[in-house]
Image: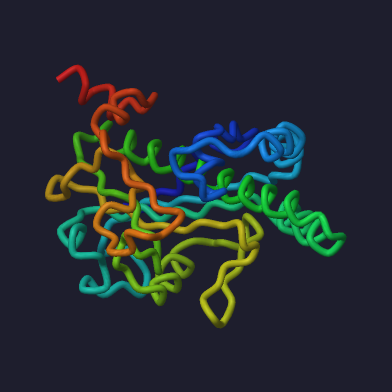
């Protein structure tokens, strides 16, 4: 079985302050008044510039291209299905970020860059929760999302090739360079495992388990179950009812 799914997560991004603050390296604190004023202007700009596109594919483990089972992260080596995901907001945000930097508007450039990262993160989370739903509609479990090269995933960057060979990335204007970098830069790729032998994740993205405790972008949901039960995901609503 192989299935290409379109989950309809493209479109306007919300860009919640909590998510944006994390990419501005403020952690749990609030930015200064000048930064907040800049955000009021730049957030609508980021929403307008974001060219949100997603691509996903679910296939049986045996149908994945160029896959050796030991290449999978240990938590999903018993998966029955693999879900590949690719999300981008296009070139426009990074191009405007560079223009602002070159004209000396360094604070604006930094904030718009953070908004672009937050937009990709938001779309990636939407896609992952829809994949949770796909799994639970079939009475299966879904793992967290494993990003190649992410410290929290402990999954080497070389696995970008596995994701790209199993997706037609050109359909959404994304390419992989010889150095395994994605273009546009505001792009996210991931792999999830689905199956009865997979442990159900409460949230798809977390830095839990990463040894880089001093990372300014660190995100570890301390109340993952409570947050999960507040999501619109049908899969997680079902968990609450149980």
Q: Quadrant of the C terminus?
A: top left
Q: Position of residue 201 (x, y in %)?
A: 24, 43
Q: In the picture, residue 209 is in which quadrant?
A: bottom left
Q: Position of residue 59 (x, y in %)?
A: 34, 55
Q: Position of residue 140 (x, y in %)?
A: 20, 40
Looking at the rendered structure, the number of numbered marks drawn on it comes to 0
Does residue 143 appear left or right of residue 108 in this picture?
Answer: left
Judging depth in this view, the residue of 212 and 91 nearest the camera is 212
Q: Position of residue 218 (x, y in %)?
A: 39, 53
Q: Is 59 placed above or below 220 here?
A: below
Task: Write the residue at 72% across / 33% down.
Answer: 37
Task: Write the residue at 29% across / 60% down.
Answer: 210
Q: Is 77 placed above or below 58 here?
A: below
Task: Write the residue at 51% across / 45% down.
Answer: 26
Judging depth in this view, the residue of 140 and 203 nearest the camera is 203
Judging depth in this view, the residue of 89 and 22 nearest the camera is 22
Q: Is 61 placed above or below 52 here?
A: below
Does residue 73 appear left or right of residue 103 in this picture?
Answer: left
Q: Residue furthest bottom?
A: 178
Q: Residue furthest top?
A: 241
Picture colour scheme: rainbow
Q: Residue furthest right?
A: 103
Does residue 46 appear left or right of residue 19 in this picture?
Answer: right
Task: Write the residue at 54% across / 51% down.
Answer: 87
Q: Is 213 placed above or below 157 here?
A: above
């Amino acid at each position: 079985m192989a299935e290409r799914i379109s989950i309809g997560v493209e479109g306007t991004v919300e860009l919640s302050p909590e998510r944006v603050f994390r990419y501005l390296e403020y952690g749990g604190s609030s930015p200064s008044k000048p930064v907040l004023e800049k955000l009021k202007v730049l957030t609508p700009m980021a929403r307008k510039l974001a060219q949100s596109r997603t691509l996903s594919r679910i296939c049986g483990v045996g149908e994945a291209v160029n896959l050796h089972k030991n290449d999978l992260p240990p938590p999903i080596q018993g998966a029955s299905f693999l879900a590949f995901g690719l999300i981008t907001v296009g070139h426009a945000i990074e191009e405007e970020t560079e223009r602002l930097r070159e004209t000396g508007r360094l604070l604006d450039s930094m904030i718009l860059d953070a908004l672009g990262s937050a937009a990709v993160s938001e779309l990636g989370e939407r896609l992952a929760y829809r994949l949770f739903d796909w799994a639970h509609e079939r009475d299966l479990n879904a793992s967290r999302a494993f990003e190649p090269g992410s410290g929290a995933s402990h999954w080497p960057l070389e696995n970008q090739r596995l994701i790209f060979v199993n997706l037609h990335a050109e359909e959404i204007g994304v390419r992989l360079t010889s150095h395994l970098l994605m273009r546009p830069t505001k792009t996210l790729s991931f792999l999830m495992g689905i199956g009865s032998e997979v442990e159900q994740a409460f949230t798809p993205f977390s830095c839990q388990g990463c040894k880089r405790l001093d990372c300014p972008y660190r995100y570890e949901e301390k109340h993952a179950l409570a947050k999960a039960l507040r999501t619109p995901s049908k899969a997680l609503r079902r968990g609450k009812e149980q």
